[in-house]
Amino acid sequence: MLPWKLIDTTDVPDGTVPLRLMQRGQEFTIKLGQNELMSSRLFGSEEALATLTCFRLADMKAPKLLIGGYGMGFTLRAALKVLGPQAKITVVELVPAIVAWARGPMVELTGDSLQDPRVTIVEGDVVTAIKAARASYDAILLDVDNGPEGLTRKSNNALYDLSGLHASLAALRPGGVLAVWSSFPHPSFTALLRKAGFKTEEIPIRAAGPRGGARHVIWLATKPHAAAVKASTPAAKKSTTKPAVPKTAARTPAGQPPAKRKTAIKKTKP
């Protein structure tokens, strides 16, 4: 068997352990310490993150998507395969080297996806991008870290706490989908999504798709439409206080014209 070769390393902003790009033959892996974050051999669940989401956008002619984390690009390429020519996808990647690796050592894997006119690559923090958006996206796909707990950097937790989920809710259009990938189940995160106001579905998925592999999880959390939100909001209490009637206003029986006011005539002495 061919040995793994170190291709490059890079630091993660606010992280303590560098990322390593490794290659063995035509296979690539990106590791954080001894943890394998992504692999060109196991990508079924990353593709499912896109296809399951885009299935829910099938009736939209020009959907707008935000993908948090480029990784090895499997989610982006799967989305491009099923979306129409008018779709727009913004990919926000925190680590510049990840994009450089996609255009360099892994260019055969990347193909022409980064040159697709539907795609915009932004080097930055997806937390900032989400907080800056207001009803801007039909879907937000998060493949950041290993799930809803920060592994590469603790500040990623800001995506998955209640405040972060409220920010994603505000960034989505009514009926929009927040899709979150995780390498492990997280029951309390399901409850948190619902607490934030999402209608939530938790889907177990194999890392290699039909070929099996480790068990991963994808959450599909839908923002309710305005009508549904309004219906779920408690109605305002009706006032039990009757409006005050001005003292000068005479009550008139229904169907009769209002009585004319008599004008007082001031008499003057001759």
Image (spheres, helix red, strand yellow):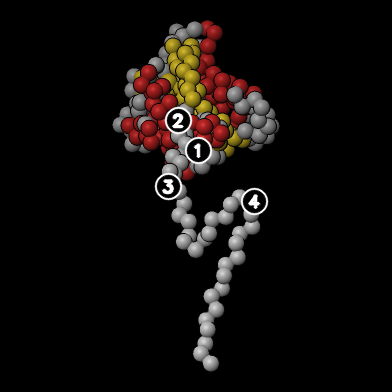
Disc 3 to disc 4, C-alpha distance: 26 Å
User: Which residue appears farthest toward the front when viewing the image?
Assistant: 270
Amino acid type at image mark 3: Thr
Closer to us: 15 or 204: 204
Amino acid type at image mark 1: Ala
Q: Secondary structure at mark 1?
A: helix
Q: Earlier in the sequence, mark 3 or mark 1?
A: 1
Q: Earlier in the sequence, mark 2 or mark 1?
A: 1
Dot 3 crowding, Cα within 10 Å, few <14, some 14–19, many 20+: few
**Residue located 52% across and 35% down the image:** 230
Closer to us: 135 or 267: 267
Label ID, residue 221: none
Query: Is mark 4 in CB contact (under 8 Å) with mark 1?
Result: no
Amino acid type at image mark 4: Gly
Residue located beneath label 4 in the image: 255
Residue located beneath label 3 in the image: 241
Residue located beneath label 1 in the image: 171
